[in-house]
Image (cartoon, rainbow, N blue to C red):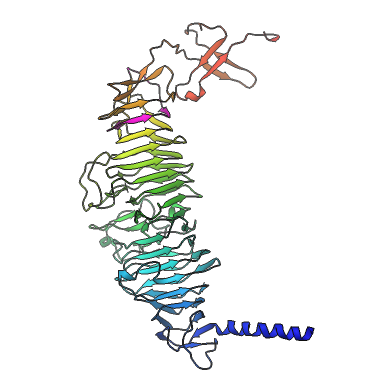
Amino acid sequence: MAKSLTCLVIALLFPVLLLSEENTLYWGGTGGNWSAAHWYDNEDLGGTAQSWQDGSRAVITGSGASVVVDQSIVAAGVDLHEDAEIRIGGSHVLRIEGATDGEGTVIFTNTSGDNMGPDHGLIVDHSDPQELAWRLQLHNDQVRINLSIIGRAQLTFQGKAQAWGNDFRIYLGSETHLLIGSLAEINNNRSDLVNARPFWVHSADDTALLEFHPHFVADLADETVFEDDYPYAYPDDDPGDGSYVKPVGGMSTWRNTSGTTVTHSSRNLATIHKYTGGEKRYTHHGLWNFEGDAQDPDPRWIVRSNAQSYDGGIYYIRDWTLVTEEDFTFEGIWHEGVNIGFASRNQEGVTVRKEGPADFIIRGTQSYSPDSHMQVAEGRVRFYTDPKVPEQARDNNGWFSQGGNYLHLTVEPDAAVHFHPPLEAPFHLYQGSIEGQLVLELAADREQAVLHIDGDMDIAGSLRLEVGESLQGAGYRLLKSSQGMLSLSATEHEIPHGWELRLEDDQRELWLRPSQDGADQRRIALHSFPQHHWLQMPEESPADEQDDQLEYFNDNDPTLNHIFRLEAHGPEGVQ
């Protein structure tokens, strides 16, 4: 009986093993259509060639091997060797339901926009974590790369994408995770190194995740050559002796419609050494965009692992959320044409929401559209430039507002916003609602208001002043509303001792004035030695009305303010 059972088990297993071998087909030709009889069931290519069978695993190797996807194909996996290529065009689809091995090339030849989308081009539907190290290229400058990821295990792209012709579009399905790996190279710049084509990421919903490896570098240029102070030279300056190094491209634009994006390094961000238009000077810039349809879930960008900075342009035409787990500094400035800065690109009524415990630091140019909103839910936003769109002519900028004060600012209870305006001019908001903390930088010789508001501002949270030196004079105008009213419903503030807040001019101005309540503003010095600590009052200070209490105030740091109880000390200790 045991022998019969063993024979039965062998009989059952043998067909499975045989079927597994038959399900791997080896390409046996050079050029040809995928559906044609160029496939063999053994790697020695022995026997009779056969037609492709959907559901098989494909192995494509051999110098000059070029397989044209001439109909929609389903493969259990594809091993594409380095010297081989696959061509996908028209409405045909290559769907891979398994491993993507090898380092070969996939060339996209489809030219019609109707053949773009999650159900076209190359589709990877995998169940186990795996890598994709293929080279993705374009047949000419009229076609698009169309890559769709629908497998729910992590897929790490370690290949090269030469998307210099038209669009490079990635479609991410629900619960997918695409990691742009440390070895990946993406170049979406044309040969003139001025113009670039979009690198799009379309996500099915907010569960789709696009992540950049900490060691992925968007710029393909040699970092040791292009230093920050490298001269903006003209191409005609090349002496021809090899000393002149040109940019080589990289990922200079990125567009997102939905889902979650995670970056771990400033080098992940789409900004590279390239040329500008016109004079073709060297610059270092790029574009980071949030686009898509209103029905798509709002995209989220998470700044993770390291503090990051960006000197390109951040444009958005839809609501999106910035999550700063680490500090993020925006440094992009307006220059030449459409390179505007941090901009809502002529789309009215859009909102950027700030979450996360770290800072969002704005040091670059800002350009908002009417009814633009910023919601600060967590952490801090620090403004070092004016949110008001400057009144200056900008060439070729039909996407952007020409000038005006448009930003509505909301600060939620667990958040703060800081304004650091220059001494000679105020910053601007259209409207404000502060349930968290408003922090204003104030200098002793400031004559302008710190902040101008067109409409209303309600400070229901707290107001803190950052004062670098002792204040003097009749007062300082902190806020001024031109058309609305200011409301100061908060009861907790951090302001210098001896000063008070006052709403004046029919609640259109908030001033810091010297206190009129007769408070004693004596200064004391606190001395500290290894074994003794005591307070010393200057001799010219009048006596305190309360013999057992002394108040200490620190103008520079009000958090040190303290009330000390006085006790007599004698030879025997405390009396």
Question: Relative to 553, does residue 403 appear above or below in the rendering?
Answer: below
Question: At 47% from the left edge and 23% from the top edge, which residue is drawn?
Answer: 558
The image quarter in which residue 94 lies: bottom left
Residue sitting at the far bottom: 47
Residue sitting at the far front: 1
Numbered disc total:
0
Question: At 33% from the left edge and 31% from the top edge, which residue is drawn?
Answer: 457
State the quadrant of the C terminus: top right
The x, y position of residue 179, in whole percent, is: 48, 61
Of residues 569 and 354, the one nearer the viewer is: 354
Question: Relative to 501, does residue 278 appear above or below in the rendering?
Answer: below
Question: At 46% from the left edge and 75% from the top edge, which residue is drawn?
Answer: 104
Residue sitting at the far right: 1
Question: Relative to 563, does residue 546 appear above or below in the rendering?
Answer: above
Q: What stretch is highlighted in magenta?
A: 452-474
- Taking the image as shown, residue 31 lies to the left or right of residue 101, namely left
The x, y position of residue 199, in whole percent, is: 36, 62
The answer to whether residue 300 is seen in the rendering is: yes
The x, y position of residue 429, in whole percent, is: 31, 36
State the quadrant of the N terminus: bottom right
472 is within the stretch colored magenta: yes
269 is within the stretch colored magenta: no
The x, y position of residue 175, in whole percent, is: 49, 60
Question: Relative to 276, does residue 406 appear above or below in the rendering?
Answer: above
The answer to whether residue 286 is seen in the rendering is: no
Of residues 528 and 48, the one nearer the viewer is: 48
Of residues 32 and 159, the one nearer the viewer is: 32
